[in-house]
Image: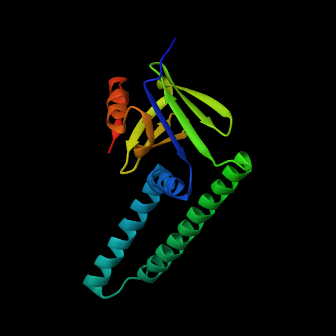
Amino acid sequence: MNEPLFKNSFMRDEKALKALYKNHYFKSKLMKVLGAIYLVLLVNSLISLALYWYSEFFGFLVLYGLIFGIIMLIKYKQEIKLNLQRDKELAGEREPIITQTVFEDRIEHEFCGITQSLDYSNVAYVADLKEYINIITKAKYVYIFKKDSFTLGNAEGFIDFLKSKGIKVQK
């Protein structure tokens, strides 16, 4: 029988969801590209403004930056709220507890009575954050482990185990 090596159990709450969105979804390739384009245009406009005291795009870029930032903040808050509503819907009267059990050949993720199994070959990378360990799959699904919620093993040992599987860990 395959014995568990690590076990992690915690309630997925607003704090966990904020960490997920802050550290994964808003660091997507699209966001990085849009941010880089905006930064190049803003620097170009600032140089034009400094050298020629004129930039036809500066006002537009400042306005665009504000609007883009506000839209992203609204989207962020909507996604958190939507996920909290989904969790409540799935959990019903129970608390939305995530329990993940790590075996030599897989990770079992249990949430609201539904169990999923993750094979290590499907892991794209791991994000080692301040309070969480996020396992991101090749299909962009994220498994969240709260560092202080290991009931078997600990966060440091888990990170070492993932590295031993050849999985890239990002700080």
Q: Is the C terminus in the top left, top right, bottom left or bottom right quadrant?
A: top left
For the residue pair 77 and 26, the one nearer the viewer reads as 77
Vertical comparison of 101 with 69: above or below: above
Q: Colour scheme in the image?
A: rainbow
Left or right of 44, for residue 27: right
User: Which residue is found at the position 38% from the left and 31% from the top?
Assistant: 153
Left or right of 42, for residue 117: right
> Where residue 141 sits: x, y (%)?
55, 39
> Where residue 87 sits: x, y (%)?
67, 50
Q: Residue furthest top?
A: 1
Vertical comparison of 50 with 139: above or below: below
User: Which residue is found at the position 63% from the left and 47% from the top?
Assistant: 96
Left or right of 28, for residue 162: left
Vertical comparison of 146 with 121: above or below: below
Query: Hey, which quadrant is residue 166 in on the image?
Result: top left
Query: Hey, which quadrant is residue 155 in on the image?
Result: top left
User: Which residue is found at the position 62% from the left and 30% from the top?
Assistant: 116
For the residue pair 13 and 65, the one nearer the viewer reads as 13
For the residue pair 103 and 79, the one nearer the viewer reads as 103
> Where residue 128 sits: x, y (%)?
36, 43
